[in-house]
Amino acid sequence: MRHVIALDVGGTGMKAALVGVDTASSEGTPPVLLYEARRPTGRERGPEAVVEAILGFAAELRELGTARYGTPAAAAGVAVPGIVDERSGTAVYAANLGWRDVPMRALLSERLGGVPVALGHDVRTGGLAEGRIGAGRGADRFLFVPLGTGIAGAIGIGGRIESGAHGSAGEIGHIVVRPGGRECGCGQRGCLETLASAAAIGRDWAAACGDPQAGAADAAKAVASGDARAHTVWQRAVDALADGLVTGLTLLDPQTLIIGGGLAEAGDTLFTPLREAVRRRVTFQRLPSIVPAALGDAAGCLGAGLLARDLLSTEVTP
């Protein structure tokens, strides 16, 4: 069976799959996951060890695919965090993995016997999957915003994800929504992710309730139970998020806003006040649909499979 390798590299772990390929109808067709596995990145051993872990994991998958299906993988796709130059295939920088200027595409291709390899940014790759086979399917233009430890974005246009001139398009988490506010790791103050990320909400709720172990999920539960302190923390984050999203939709005019990440698991506790907060802020703008992501933490791996499948397709250029 013709198949590709898909790898989604996170800060602490990697998800991978062997993905069946149907090159005759790749656009909009969900990948068939033939095999799935997970491994730690081993980042405590340093960036070189992380790179070797990725290469070794990919080589294992190649051997498994050859043994099971009689032929090695025809291509591979890998999604990594940080700053990514997709055109050159370079993992430029990742603070949580400690690497700089890793020629990931070339290294993987060499380890996999010279097959073509696609390299993608983790959030943009997840956005690709959500756009083609998830919550954004059928939307010509969408904005995918996962809310996790930080906040990033993926801009979907015509079935592809815009990476920008320098590989940093979609960084909505660093829109300043509260000038002079909290210091952000990027060097600015008042960035969206300092107020509306899961980490920010968890920090604020821990301070409000007096439990240093409390997190964003605990805040959501407290909101649902009617806790007034939790409602204050939650609404402050929702208002900041709405300000950032309205800036995004003013610039991009998307049909759909897809909200993912751990905070999206709060369901209506998040989406009901968020839709209302965005609605109150729009004036001339067309209000997009605001929907939860559909693919969960599988989005990155599925997106990597789509990147690899695109390399083999005559219908979608890599």
Image (cartoon, rainbow, N blue to C red):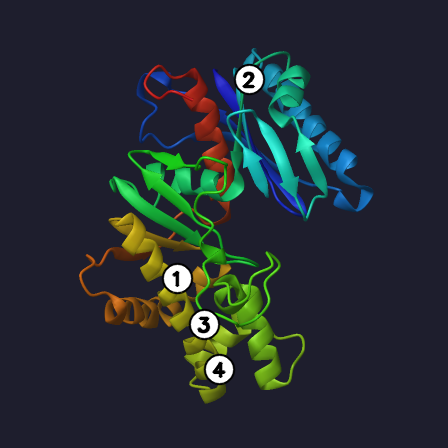
Question: Residue 113 appears at what percent x and percent y?
Answer: 64, 12
Of residues 72 and 135, the one drawn nearer to the viewer in this rendering: 135
Read off the residue under disc 4: 230
Q: Earlier in the sequence, mark 3 or mark 2?
A: 2
Image side of residue 284 versus residue 133, left or right: left
Q: Do the residues labelled 3 and 2 touch (CB within 8 Å)?
A: no
Residue kind at label 4, given as amino acid type: Ala
Vertical placement of residue 12 versus 65, above or below: below
Q: Residue furthest right?
A: 45
Name the element at disc 3: helix
Task: Compute the Cα span from label 3 to label 1.
Answer: 11 Å
Read off the residue under disc 3: 237
Image side of residue 175 versus residue 184, left or right: left
Q: How crowded is the residue under tag 2: few (<14 C-alpha within 10 Å), some, or many (20+)?
A: many
Read off the residue under disc 2: 73
Vertical placement of residue 314 versus 51, above or below: above
Vertical placement of residue 183 versus 289, above or below: below
Of residues 317 and 272, the one drawn nearer to the viewer in this rendering: 317
